[in-house]
């Protein structure tokens, strides 16, 4: 009987994450970066080329083919649908939550171990990228596995974890190439303590196993290139190292991390401070590792929010410690309860009502999206308002988790984080139903891809085009009765042939669907 109860308890722990992870409604991509990868995965299946990252009729050699391969393979197995395209990210998100759960057990104990992954799943940055078909969650999952395996290594007899610590490095390189050196450098203080790991043959065996996908890919693509692929990857690294569109000041992460790790930022900072002063060996992972990683990223020219995803599990562990610390110290508990039960709910309620009365009608959200967003915010504020000074630690934890849990669940099921190009998707669904378009390939006129706006739009249009044709230099290359996406109508009028615009509107602008008669 007890075993049955325990099994049910474990099942409950799995079921509780379903509203945060899975969405079964209609989806649409954003252009960068997930649309870019999804389009490359489509060309893998269309052209049967599993080695070279393509961009229309050319090669795109500034990245590996790791994610595109996973998306294409998932769609080959489960069908060419968007749900299958997101499966690699979804699987990595689930594995990262599980690894966070196990790390909580390792650092603390099994009590409240479910809290850390729940905190992670309701953190804005992690929640956002766990529903994007990009490399970032997969890479961050691999880093988290590497950290967990390192923590589990107590002696040279822990061969499995030593092997695992070697494997994640090569797999991470296949995902994000040279970015893998950032967590490795950040782990140096801890590796110095466990330096015997580096002399283990299982570490080097794991390192070799992890690099097998990259080595196989590099060998398969090499015959098509003038020089080895590693040189192209180095060129991309040099571009990111120098001033570019993503260059930000050195203090970028000082404000970006507290914002993107809402609503848990302040608890994570408090927990990290506590671990720095009170923890011994754990401080190398819970404090020195994330701080060193942030310092290294701050030196690097390119700075983006998702670079810090690789420490999001560590932040969730520190968040739990921060909440526990504030509860246990009467000196801070009154302030903690007052802010969380009065100030924050009041702010959320004011924000919700302000949005409802002044901004709701000027956004592009539909009634479902607005309703779910408003309900999520109200439930968030209501949940935290129930926190009382007399509550037990368990009761406070439940109240703190339920608010963000309901908000993120409502927002996900509204489609805001999954159907991100809803209006364009709806237009493309209509275009696909037009008789003249059905079962016809639609080409793309290259001259229209002349800026980031037109490129962003054509990426999303191409992904939603049922039968995507080729990229043509100009409309003169169109054959009779062929369709194409073009941007300049005056070019069409100046041609001797008769062209007709089948469909255009502001949502698809600057692109128009044309036909050569």
Image: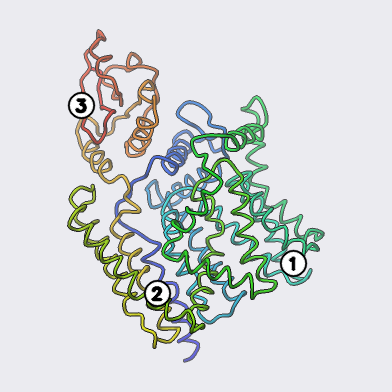
Q: Nearer the viewer, residue 46 or 151?
A: 151
C-alpha distance separating marks 3 and 1: 64 Å
Q: Position of residue 74 (x, y in %)?
A: 47, 50
Q: How is the image coloured?
A: rainbow
Q: Of discs 3 and 2, which sits in the foreground? A: 2
State which tag comes first along the sequence, 3 or 1. 1
Q: Residue at x 68, y 70 (%)?
A: 152
* SS assignment at label 2: helix
Q: Position of residue 161 (x, y in %)?
A: 69, 66
Tell me if mark 2 has few (under 14), some (14-19) or many (20+) residues whose alpha carbon lies within 10 angstroms of its own.
many
C-alpha distance separating marks 1 and 2: 39 Å
Q: Which mark is residue 159?
A: 1
Vertical placement of 210 versus 489: above or below? below
Vertical placement of 275 versus 140: above or below? below
Q: Of discs 1 and 2, which sits in the foreground? A: 2
Tell me if mark 1 has few (under 14), some (14-19) or many (20+) residues whose alpha carbon lies within 10 angstroms of its own.
some
Vertical placement of 150 versus 66: above or below? below
Q: Which mark is residue 502?
A: 3
Q: Position of residue 60 (x, y in %)?
A: 53, 31
* SS assignment at label 1: helix
Q: Nearer the viewer, residue 67 or 69?
A: 67
C-alpha distance separating marks 3 and 2: 53 Å
């Amino acid at each position: 009987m007890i075993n049955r109860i325990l099994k049910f308890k474990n099942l409950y722990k799995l079921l509780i994450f379903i509203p945060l992870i899975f969405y079964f409604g209609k989806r649409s991509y954003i252009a960068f970066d997930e649309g870019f990868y999804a389009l490359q995965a489509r060309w893998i299946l269309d052209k049967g080329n599993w080695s070279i990252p393509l961009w229309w009729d050319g090669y795109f050699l500034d990245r590996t083919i790791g994610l595109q391969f996973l998306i294409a393979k998932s769609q080959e197995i489960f069908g060419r649908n968007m749900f299958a395209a997101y499966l690699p990210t979804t699987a990595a998100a689930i594995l990262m939550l599980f690894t966070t759960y196990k790390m909580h057990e390792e650092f603390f104990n099994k009590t409240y171990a479910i809290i850390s992954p729940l905190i992670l799943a309701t953190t804005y940055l992690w929640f956002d990228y766990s529903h994007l078909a990009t490399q970032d969650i997969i890479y961050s999952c691999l880093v988290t596995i590497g950290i967990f395996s390192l923590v589990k290594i107590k002696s040279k007899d822990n061969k499995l974890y030593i092997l695992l610590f070697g494997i994640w490095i090569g797999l991470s390189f296949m995902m994000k190439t040279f970015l893998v050196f950032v967590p490795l450098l950040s782990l140096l203080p801890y590796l110095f303590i466990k330096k015997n790991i580096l002399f283990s043959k299982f570490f080097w065996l794991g390192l070799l196993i992890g690099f097998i996908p990259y080595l196989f890919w590099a060998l398969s693509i090499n015959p098509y290139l003038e020089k080895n692929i590693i040189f192209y990857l180095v060129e991309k690294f040099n571009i990111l190292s120098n001033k570019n569109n993503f260059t930000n000041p050195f203090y970028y992460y000082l404000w970006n991390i507290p914002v993107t790790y809402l609503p848990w930022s302040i608890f994570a900072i408090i927990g990290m401070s506590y671990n720095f002063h009170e923890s011994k060996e754990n401080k190398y992972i819970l404090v020195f590792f994330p701080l060193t990683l942030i310092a290294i990223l701050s030196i690097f020219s390119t700075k983006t929010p998702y670079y810090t995803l690789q420490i999001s599990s560590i932040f969730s562990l520190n968040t739990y410690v921060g909440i526990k610390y504030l509860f246990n110290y009467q000196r801070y508990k009154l302030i903690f309860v007052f802010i969380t039960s009065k100030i924050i709910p009041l702010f959320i309620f004011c924000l919700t009502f302000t949005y409802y009365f002044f901004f709701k009608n000027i956004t592009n959200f539909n009634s479902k999206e607005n309703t779910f967003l408003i309900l999520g915010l109200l439930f968030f504020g209501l949940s935290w308002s129930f926190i009382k000074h007399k509550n037990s630690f368990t009761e406070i934890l439940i109240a703190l988790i339920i608010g963000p849990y309901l908000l993120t669940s409502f927002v996900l099921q509204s489609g805001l984080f999954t159907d991100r190009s809803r209006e364009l998707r709806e237009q493309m669904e209509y275009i696909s139903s037009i008789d003249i378009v059905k079962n016809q390939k639609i080409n793309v006129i290259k001259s229209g891809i002349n800026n980031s706006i037109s490129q962003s739009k054509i990426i999303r249009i191409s992904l939603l085009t049922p039968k995507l044709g080729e990229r043509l230099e100009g409309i003169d290359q169109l054959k009779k009765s062929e369709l194409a996406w073009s941007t300049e109508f005056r070019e069409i009028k100046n041609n001797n042939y008769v062209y007709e615009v089948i469909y255009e509107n502001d949502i698809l602008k600057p692109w128009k669907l044309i036909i050569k008669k």
